Image (tube, grey):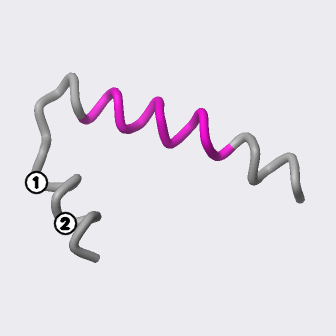
Amino acid sequence: VKREVVDTRPILQFVHSLYHDIGIHDLTVQTEFV
């Protein structure tokens, strides 16, 4: 279980990088507000 938590960080960073490259900032803003 602990490994899953650790493996989540790289995944989130990867997804965030993809969204940033695509130029989708709306989803990021919504996530911050939520």
Q: Secondary structure at mark 1?
A: helix
**Image-quadrant location for residue 1:** bottom right
Q: Secondary structure at mark 2?
A: helix
Inspect the magenta stretch and tell me whether residue 18 lies in it: yes
Where is residue 27? Give x, y as percent. 19, 55
Where is residue 4? Give x, y as percent. 79, 50
Q: Amino acid at mark 1?
A: Asp
Q: Residue at x 75, y 53 (%)?
A: 5
In the image, which disc is placed on residue 2?
none
Which of 22 and 34 lies nearest the eye of the viewer?
A: 34
Q: Residue at x 26, y 64 (%)?
A: 32
Question: In the image as oriented, which residue stretches furthest toward the top?
Answer: 21
Determine whether, in the image, residue 5 is placed left or right of residue 15.
right
Q: Residue at x 72, y 40 (%)?
A: 7
How far apart in space, not on screen, are marks 2 and 1 (Cα)?
Answer: 6 Å
Q: How many marks?
A: 2
Cβ atoms at labels 2 and 1 below 8 Å apart: yes
Dominant secondary-structure state across the stretch colored magenta: helix
Say which residue label 2 marks.
30
Question: In the image as oriented, which residue stretches furthest toward the front?
Answer: 32
Where is residue 31? Give x, y as percent. 28, 64
Determine whether, in the image, residue 20 is placed left or right of residue 6.
left
Q: Is residue 26 above or below residue 33?
A: above
Where is residue 16? Give x, y as percent. 36, 37
Stretch in magenta: 8-19
Say which residue label 1 marks.
26
Packing grade of label 1 (10 A; few <14, some 14-19, many >=20) is few
Q: Amino acid at mark 2?
A: Gln
- Quarter of the image containing the C terminus? bottom left
Packing grade of label 2 (10 A; few <14, some 14-19, many >=20) is few
Inspect the magenta stretch and tell me whether residue 27 lies in it: no
